[in-house]
Amino acid sequence: MTSQNEVRLAGTLSDWKDRQGFGFITPEAGGDRIFVHRTAFTNRKRQPAVGAKLLYSLAPHKSRRVCASQVSFVMDTAQARAADARQGSASWSVVLFLSLLAVITFKGYLPVAVLGLYLVASAISFLAYSEDKSAARAGHWRTSEKILHLLDVLCGWPGGLLAQKKLRHKCAKRDFQVVFWLTVFTNCAGLAWLLSPGGKALLRHFF
């Protein structure tokens, strides 16, 4: 824990290497950048991202003069409420999508196997994101982003979306988010095609 006499400094995360689990903080007061490791963050649930405002203390380091310790994110109440709102919105979006899919299925427009595929793939995708988050915290071998995207496009995106918001994992990576939403669009386009005459004919052939 941080002692009452320990000096807290402010800075911005100016560089972050997610796979290696370390980066550098640019002090608000100026001066050399400060090395920071993933294990120095007090909130391990939030993914570090370039541009994040931080509070930190200084501690000796075995290979550097000093490094950051007891690092916390500067996040005001309004931002926290916004993050909670996004998480709730994502949860309701997934529930709404799966509920609609269930209605369509039980009305006979889609085989039950399609609904089952979404549920199983979503569970697998959620677990894959969770494992990757745990590996990131521990500095272990990470799950490839290509694997996560593949699971999402193969009907696992509802679970992937829930994992991103609830675990706060991959949310801040813009490149990842762009590809993720492309997988959602691609998957939903495929689902829409299955509801078309051509798609129904194909389903009748297999089911």
Image (cartoon, helix red, strand yellow):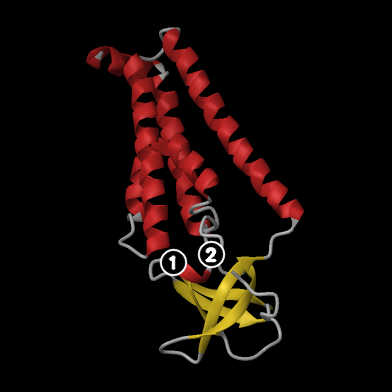
Q: Residues within 10 Å of mark 2 (few under 14, many from 20)?
A: many
Query: Is the C-beta separation of discs 1 and 2 under 8 Å?
Result: yes
Q: Secondary structure at mark 1?
A: loop
Residue in view at x 56 percent, y 60 percent? 43
Q: Give how far across and how far down residue 153 sits, in percent.
A: 38, 39
Say if 206 sits above or below 185 in the image: above
Disc assigned to residue 48: 2
Residue in view at x 61 percent, y 67 percent? 72
Q: Amino acid at mark 1?
A: Asp
In this rendering, does residue 52 appear at all?
Answer: no
| Total numbered circles | 2
Nearest to the observer: residue 117 or residue 197: 117
Disc assigned to residue 179: none
Q: Which residue is mark 1?
A: 18
Q: Give how far across and how far down residue 93 sits, in percent.
A: 57, 31
Say if 13 sits above or below 97 in the image: below
Q: Secondary structure at mark 2?
A: loop
Residue 74, image quadrant? bottom right
Q: Give how far across and how far down residue 199 sits, in percent.
A: 35, 20
Q: Quadrant where the C terminus lies? A: top left
Residue in view at x 55 percent, y 76 percent? 69
Residue 205, image quadrant? top left
Nearest to the observer: residue 163 or residue 172: 163
Say if 34 sits above or below 104 in the image: below
Q: Amino acid at mark 2?
A: Pro
Nearest to the observer: residue 119 or residue 203: 119
Q: Earlier in the sequence, mark 1 or mark 2?
A: 1
Residue in view at x 51 percent, y 59 percent? 44
Q: Give how far across and how far down residue 38 sits, in percent.
A: 47, 69
- State the separation of the CA atoms marked 1 and 2: 8 Å
Q: Residues within 10 Å of mark 1 (few under 14, many from 20)?
A: some
